[in-house]
Every structure is written in C-alpha cells, then in structure tokens.
Image (cartoon, rainbow, N blue to C red):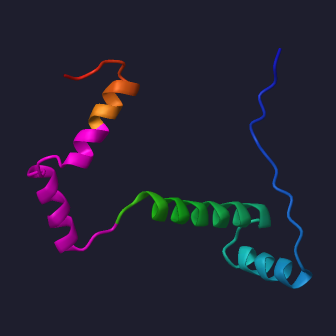
Amino acid sequence: MARTIAEERIPARMPTAVYERILEAAQSVGATLNQFVVQSALEKANAILEGERIIKLSTASADAVFSLIENPPEPNEYLMDAMRQHNKTIAGNNPS
C-alpha cells in the first residue's frame, strides 16, 4: 500500500542574527517559529503570484482594451497570413 506524504520540509540555514530576529517576531505574535515561517512564506508567495497573474490597468487603458474587444479591427494582411498558415499546418486543411 502506497503512503501519501501529507507534509513537506524546507530546511533553511541562516545567520544567527536572522534566526533570532525571526524567532522574536514569531514570539511577538504568539506563533511557533515553524508557524511564523510557513505563514510568512505563504503570504509572500501569494503576493508574488498575484502580481504575476493580475494585470492592473488605468481607467483609460482598461477602456481601450474593452473597446478593442467590443469593436475589433479588421484583420490585416499579417493576421490573415497567420490564419492561413495555422489552417495549413495545424488544422490540416487548406483554405481556398
């Protein structure tokens, strides 16, 4: 029977001054060192991933994007060539 590992470990070496600072912060909020490190790392990871996944636009930029979505321009020759190439190589059919 296969065992599922429910927890992972992250070993970390750090200077004593850094360790003591992190430990002091953990104690000040009533958390264990492990709880504090995991929570802090998770918060930082979430912030980084949110920054990578969310596009922030000014009102003017958002209006421009929505306008292009609602009223797309006519395809230019470059786009039409790309669509023909796609149909030829990926879709497997040859447009007339």
- Residue lying furthest front: 96
Above or below, 72 relative to 39: above
Question: Quick check: is 81 in the magenta stretch?
Answer: yes
Quadrant location of the C terminus in the rendered image:
top left
Above or below, 15 relative to 57: below
Q: Residue 94: x, y in percent?
A: 28, 20
In the shown orientation, is residue 20 left or right of residue 88? right
Is residue 72 or residue 18 the one in the foreground? 72
**Residue at the spot 18% in from the left edge and 49% down from the top edge:** 76
**Residue at the spot 34% in from the left edge and 33% down from the top edge:** 85
**Residue at the spot 82% in from the left edge and 81% down from the top edge:** 18
**Residue at the spot 16% in from the left edge and 51% down from the top edge:** 69
Quarter of the image where one finds residue 61: bottom left
From the image, give the main secondary structure of the stretch colored magenta: helix
Question: Quick check: is 80 in the magenta stretch?
Answer: yes
Q: Residue 75: x, y in percent?
A: 16, 46
Q: Residue 41: x, y in percent?
A: 66, 64
Is residue 69 or residue 81 the one in the foreground? 81
In the shown orientation, is residue 37 left or right of residue 43? right
- Residue lying furthest left: 71
Q: Residue 31: x, y in percent?
A: 71, 67
Residue stretch rendered in magenta on the structure: 56-82
Quadrant location of the N terminus in the rendered image:
top right
Above or below, 88 relative to 22: above
